[in-house]
DNA sequence: CTGAAAGCGCTTACAG
DNA sequence: CTGAAAGCGCTTACAG
């Protein structure tokens, strides 16, 4: 910057002014300074700037898994909203590694970002404690950490489960299977709750099929359990807790010679692009990742700009049903059956 | 930091020393300072540090598209290698937006990162010019920009095409179809070149099928063109330039009542997880994204640590064939047919 | 409208 | 082994 000032024949302060308050500078000198900047290829040192100005229009987003398209959607939504708010979004991928997640949190803390967005998979207590202690705003995404000192943005997984079961019931099915793992993961627990509520309200039957693997590899185990049921208790519809698992179920049913949805209807949950290529397009429940990311940025910006007035809140974003062939067949789904 | 010094009853310089050169400080005072740091929850301001120290162990990675699993793999490989080198990797997603890409480059430049990794989709000339001008090291990934002033890491797409065609030829096929778009994109151009070379060397026939959409949506157009060929010229094997396109072809062939690979063998290229769910597991050519990311970090670190001695180089990472059912059927592929 | 000066939070020779 | 002081590149009241 000193070089720019020298070349333009002005003081440091003036260069700073054309950078920060161009309207306060006479046009002729502003142009002269601008020329010097261009000629020298000057790029202001953002670290020095934010050190001196005490502000830093940057948001850090720590993500648990970029391989999961939900998180990519979250990043995209956050990115767009951040840009709209005049902030820059930086991503750090913790790749399912809790220790690395804490490293990233500390990194952003050290970089004095305006705030941090955190999408964890397990309870992020220690890391968030450290960050909150220094007062940096944190928004937790897609995980209900039950913290009163942060905003939270959740997808309504209970509703996702309810939507799924309701859809199958509306199609006329009377005996549903819910294929899932343990309730260890919040989304599994909540989706199960939603399925149970819909089933109870409608007075239909529910068979819960436990599997150890929520990816497509869980398909064979699920189908084996279905086949082992007495004929009278065999479900007419399957809800898999994830799309990948739903895909595995469809594949395995195909191997067993059963038609989907002719012999049995199937749906997943997640709207996962990795499950889009199946032989039968899979009905699913879409989780609005982009809205989650955007809402989180909005909450963060609110907290940053009005630290005093800000009230922490939990935003719950609704999922939506995506009907495709695996439940409804090739024809459009009947709106109201049975 | 002043608070820490006060609480520990030492000077600022001493606190700095326990942070940067703990061995130069007497144990008892080091412990005292450490206690103060813990008690106060002090996190050093990394901006001030790198301003004063003139170094910044951070690498910025600008990615064109996080929705593409190749780039996620690249990010993962770069992340791991960066951690191994004691650096932190920061991600910025330009989401197929050239203007946003330049914004991210300038951001990293302003943040005075040690170096930048750039995975673009089109020629990144202007952005890289700006960054190189100030001397910041840049490594270009997955795109041959033909710049002598940067290192480059490429996947050998020509070889990928050659591997694909060679595989089909080895399986005994004598009339191959190559389904792809224009040569506008480097990977398409190079893969085509490899396919042509293998076909010419083997003296078999090649039919080139142009499609406008390289995703699964291109499938119907491709199959329509195949069906329109005179019976005597109909290919016995299809190589799609991407896995998604290969998936689309398999789906459309299924709709047309043709068996894969019984009636016609199909393969893709990319090893894209989004194409893994098809009714017939797709043979593909795997692009080693993690190695690309890791190699790029290694080149960058070399340039950063020995700016004088460093010679720019282009590393070309070899792809590898992944044989699955869509070309080889359920039995293992014969090693040498025809 | 422009400049001189203090200060942001740290590091690093240099003394002691 | 520890401290005082200069400096990293910028911003921002405050004068003029």
Image: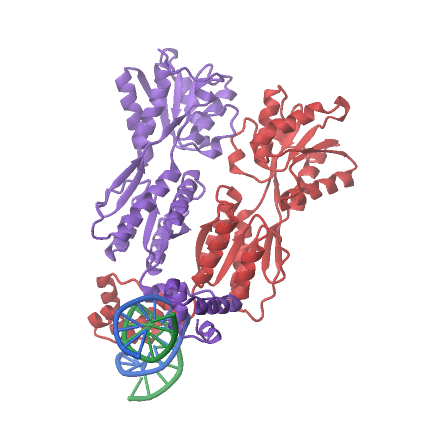
Chain colours: A purple, B red, C green, D blue
Nearer to us in this view, B322 or B226: B226
Instruction: Where is residue B243? Give x, y as percent.
Output: 58, 36
Q: Is residue B289 above or below residue A48?
A: above
Q: Does residue A193 appear in the picture of this structure? A: yes
Q: Is residue B229 above or below residue B104?
A: above
The image quadrant that residue B183 belongs to is top right
Q: Residue at x 63, y 37 (%)?
A: B241
Residue B156: give x, y in percent of width and height: 64, 48
Give the answer, above or below, for where B290 lies relative to A48: above
Q: Quadrant of residue A142?
A: top left
Compared with residue A146, is residue B256 higher up or lower down, i.e. above or below?
above
Q: Position of residue B204 (x, y in %)?
A: 77, 34
Q: Is residue B29 left or right of residue A41?
A: left
The answer to whether residue B330 is visible is no
Question: Residue A304 versus residue B325: which sits nearer the camera?
Answer: A304
Quarter that holds the C terminus of chain A: top left
Residue extending furthest right? B203
Residue B295, located in which quarter of the rendered image?
bottom right
Q: Residue A70, how many percent across, how many down? A: 41, 38
Q: How many marks?
A: 0
Image quadrant holding the N terminus of chain A, namely bottom left
**Left or right: residue A206 compared with residue A38:** left
Give the left or right position of residue A241, taking residue B138 as reference: left
Please give the name of the residue rendered at 50% of the width and 54% of the height, measured from the top-left corner. Answer: B102
Q: Nearer the viewer, residue A214 or A269?
A: A269
Front residue of this view, candidates A170 and A310: A310
């Amino acid at each position: 910057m000193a070089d720019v000032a020298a070349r333009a024949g002005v003081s440091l302060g003036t260069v700073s002014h054309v950078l920060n308050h161009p309207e306060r500078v006479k046009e002729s000198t502003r142009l002269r300074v601008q020329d010097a900047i261009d000629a020298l290829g000057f790029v202001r040192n953002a670290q020095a700037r934010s050190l001196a100005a005490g502000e830093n229009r940057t948001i850090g987003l720590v993500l648990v898994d970029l391989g999961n398209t939900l998180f990519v959607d979250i990043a995209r939504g956050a990115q767009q909203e951040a840009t709209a708010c005049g902030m820059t979004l930086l991503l750090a991928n913790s790749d399912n590694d809790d220790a690395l997640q804490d490293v990233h949190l500390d990194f952003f803390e050290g970089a004095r970002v305006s705030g941090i967005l955190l999408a964890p998979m397990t309870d992020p207590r220690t890391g968030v404690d450290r960050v909150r202690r220094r007062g940096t705003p944190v928004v937790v995404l897609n995980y209900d950490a039950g913290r009163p000192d942060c905003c939270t943005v959740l997808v309504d997984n209970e509703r996702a489960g309810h939507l799924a079961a309701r859809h199958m019931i509306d199609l006329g099915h009377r005996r549903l299977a819910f294929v899932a793992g343990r309730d260890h993961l919040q989304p599994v627990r909540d989706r199960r709750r939603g399925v149970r509520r819909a089933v109870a309200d409608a007075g239909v039957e529910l068979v819960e099929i436990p599997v150890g693997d929520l990816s497509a590899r869980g398909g064979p185990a699920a189908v084996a359990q279905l086949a082992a049921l007495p004929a009278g208790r065999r479900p007419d519809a399957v809800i898999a807790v994830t799309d990948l698992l739903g895909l595995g179920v469809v594949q395995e049913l195909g191997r067993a010679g059963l038609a989907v949805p002719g012999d049995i209807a199937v749906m997943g949950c997640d709207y996962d692009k990795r499950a889009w290529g199946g032989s039968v397009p899979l009905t699913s429940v879409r989780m609005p990742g982009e809205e989650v990311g955007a809402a989180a940025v909005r909450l963060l910006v609110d907290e940053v700009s009005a630290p005093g007035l800000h009230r922490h809140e939990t935003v719950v974003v609704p999922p939506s049903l995506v009907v495709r062939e695996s439940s409804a067949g090739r024809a459009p789904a009947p709106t109201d059956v049975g």
